[in-house]
Amino acid sequence: MKQTESKNQDEYLSPKQVAEILGMKLGGVYNQVAKGMIGIPYYRFGKLIKFKKSDVEKYLEECRVEPKQQERNNS
């Protein structure tokens, strides 16, 4: 594989790396995967679980909450 091709491919993350990014415990990631509640697509190869870094980043953006602007009362 050429070096330029590998740059275009997505990086894959372990559950431990995802837990660190999300600020969760590793067990929490595994529990959410087991319950089907993780909210992030993942790949399962037997017991091995991997997440695409771009999917994790997309999930984080979807969780973003914009602050509401409050109207000032000038009475």
Image (tube, rainbow, N blue to C red):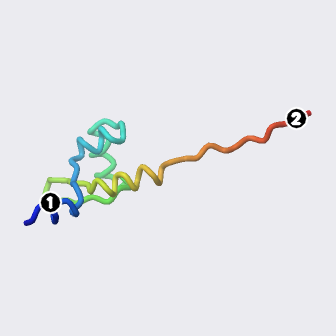
* Residue at 36 percent of width and 36 percent of height: 23
- Badge 1 local density, few (<14 within 10 Å), some, or many (20+)? few
Residue corresponding to mark 1:
45
* Residue at 28 percent of width and 53 percent of height: 53
* Type of amino acid at the residue the image marks with label 2: Asn
Residue sitting at the far top: 75
Q: Quadrant of the C terminus?
A: top right
Q: Observer-nearest residue: 39 or 57?
A: 57
Relative image position of residue 54 (x, y in whole percent)? 32, 56
Q: Give me the C-alpha separation between circle 1 and circle 2.
A: 61 Å
Relative image position of residue 71 (x, y in whole percent)? 78, 41
Choose the circle earlier in sequence order: 1 or 2. 1
Residue corresponding to mark 2:
74
Q: Is residue 23 left or right of residue 46?
A: right
* Type of amino acid at the residue the image marks with label 1: Phe
Which numbered marker is on residue 6? none
Residue sitting at the far front: 4
- Nearer to us of marks 1 and 2 is 2
